[in-house]
Amino acid sequence: MIKIAPSILAADFARLGESVQAAEAAGADYAHVDVMDGVFVPNISIGIPVVAALRKITRLPLDVHLMITRPERYLADFVAAGASIVTVHVEACDHLHRAVQQIRELGARPGVTLNPATSLETVREILPYVDQVLIMSVNPGFGGQEYIPTMTDKIARLAAMIRQTGRAVDIEVDGGIDAERAAEVVAAGANVLVAGTAVFRYPGGVKAGINAIRAACLVH
């Protein structure tokens, strides 16, 4: 089943709770929360208090993507705040297996993220231990960027790698995803689509944006 995870980075932060509730009512599967520290990526976004606030107003799983250095320092805090899924970057962890193991022990689903230029080989050894791999299809740090076309082949190669493990590991894609791109990445093997601008800034509204992406996925 294809899951749609609207990214709150594109929401109206003055009405963030209402925006997330609108996405939930429109049939979103997750709320995607991008956490940036201004060090690992060239931007600063939100943190633990926002995750805790969202947990109080939505039943959606909170898909927390940590774009921060040494994320293991804050894993317990994010899970305690209400994170359902915690995804860390392979580029940001000195001891990736330890971080993944800690996320699971804390009671959340662990995931790992790859930047566009990072080789898939960096996740081969961690695949038996994660529930999700996030492919960044733009360079992380800012919303509204255009999809990098070569990421489609990377998604397909990751799907083949996962099949070799015999495990059900979700493939999430983040960056430049809209109704036009959705069918392409789903055909390549993705099953969790992060969409910010294409949902929260869709001309017809949040529900229409989600419906457009989901309809495109039905082709496959």
Image (cartoon, helix red, strand yellow):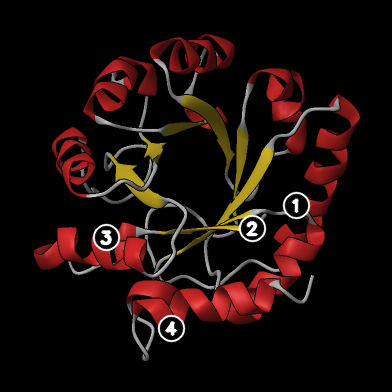
In the image, what residue type sits under mark 1? Answer: Ile
**Helix, strand or loop for disc 3:** helix
In the image, what residue type sits under mark 3? Answer: Val
| Residue 154 in picture, x, y percent from top left | 77, 51
Q: Residues within 10 Å of mark 4 (few under 14, many from 20)?
A: some
Mark toward the start of the polypeptide (2 vs 1)? 2
Question: Disc 1 versus disc 4: distance between alpha carbons?
Answer: 26 Å
The residue labelled by disc 3 is: 20
In the image, what residue type sits under mark 4? Answer: Ala
Residue 134 visible in the snapshot: yes
At horizontal 28% and vertical 51% (from top left) the residue drawn is: 43
Mark toward the start of the polypeptide (1 vs 4)? 1
Q: 110 or 56, which is in the foreground?
A: 56
Q: Residues within 10 Å of mark 1 (few under 14, many from 20)?
A: many
The answer to whether the residues at label 2 and label 4 have Cβ atoms under 8 Å apart is no
Question: Disc 3 versus disc 1: distance between alpha carbons?
Answer: 28 Å
Callout in the foreground (3, 1): 3
Question: Disc 2 versus disc 1: distance between alpha carbons?
Answer: 15 Å
Mark toward the start of the polypeptide (3 vs 1)? 3
Q: 208 or 16, which is in the foreground?
A: 208
The residue labelled by disc 2 is: 2
The residue labelled by disc 1 is: 155
